[in-house]
Amino acid sequence: MSENTWIDITVDDATGLADFYKRVMGWTCDTVDMGEYQDYVMLNCEGEPMGGICHKRGSNAELPSGWIPYFVVSDLDNALVEVHQCGGTQYGDVRHHGKAAFAIIKDISGSHCALYDKAYRDDEE
């Protein structure tokens, strides 16, 4: 998987789906502690991360179901302005992941993806 992309899926039964891909693809997984439940980072046969499988709970409760690719952008704020100006929509707020941040969007075709800024700095920092 390119270091510039990531893919995950948010579903009601993340454990069942993780088991499905473990059997079908021969993948393994690392668990991610979410407090009251576990989400999963799926690893290929070489132990490389392939994507995430998340429960449709907590901060992910309102996300669309289905695989969501994450695409790296150099300026998340500017990219989100362009999303809105071009007729797309944003799901929820910008989410922070360490020094990075991302936002889930729906493009003008109705497809979903995430825009990911590896070095995001918001106005509060």
Image (cartoon, rainbow, N blue to C red):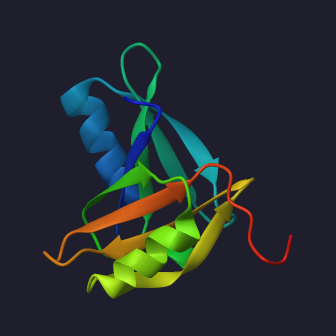
Q: Is residue 89 visible?
A: yes
Q: Residue furthest top?
A: 46
**Closer to the camera in the image, 110 or 59:** 110
Q: Say which residue appears at 46% left-offset and 69% top-offset.
A: 79
Q: In this view of the protein, can residue 56 be seen by the observer?
A: no
Q: Residue at x 42, y 13 (%)?
A: 46
Across and down, in percent, residue 56 comes to: 42, 72
Give the residue drawn at x 37%, y 29%: 1
Question: Vertical placement of 43 versus 86: above or below?
Answer: above
Residue 101 on image: x %, y %:
62, 61
Among all residues in the image, which is located at the extreme left? 109
**Residue at the image position 18 percent from the left and 78 percent from the top:** 108
- Residue 90: image quadrant is bottom left
Residue with the most extreme right position: 125
From what the image shows, is residue 40 above or below residue 54? above
In the image, residue 40 lies at what x, y percent?
49, 46
Quadrant of the image occupied by residue 4: top left
Tell me the quadrant of the picture where the C terminus can be found. bottom right
Total numbered badges shown on the rendered structure: 0
Relative to 68, 24 lies left or right: left
Relative horizontal placement of residue 1, taking residue 121 as reference (left or right): left
The picture places residue 99, in percent across and down from the top left corner, at 74, 53
User: Is residue 45 shown left or right of residue 80?
Assistant: left
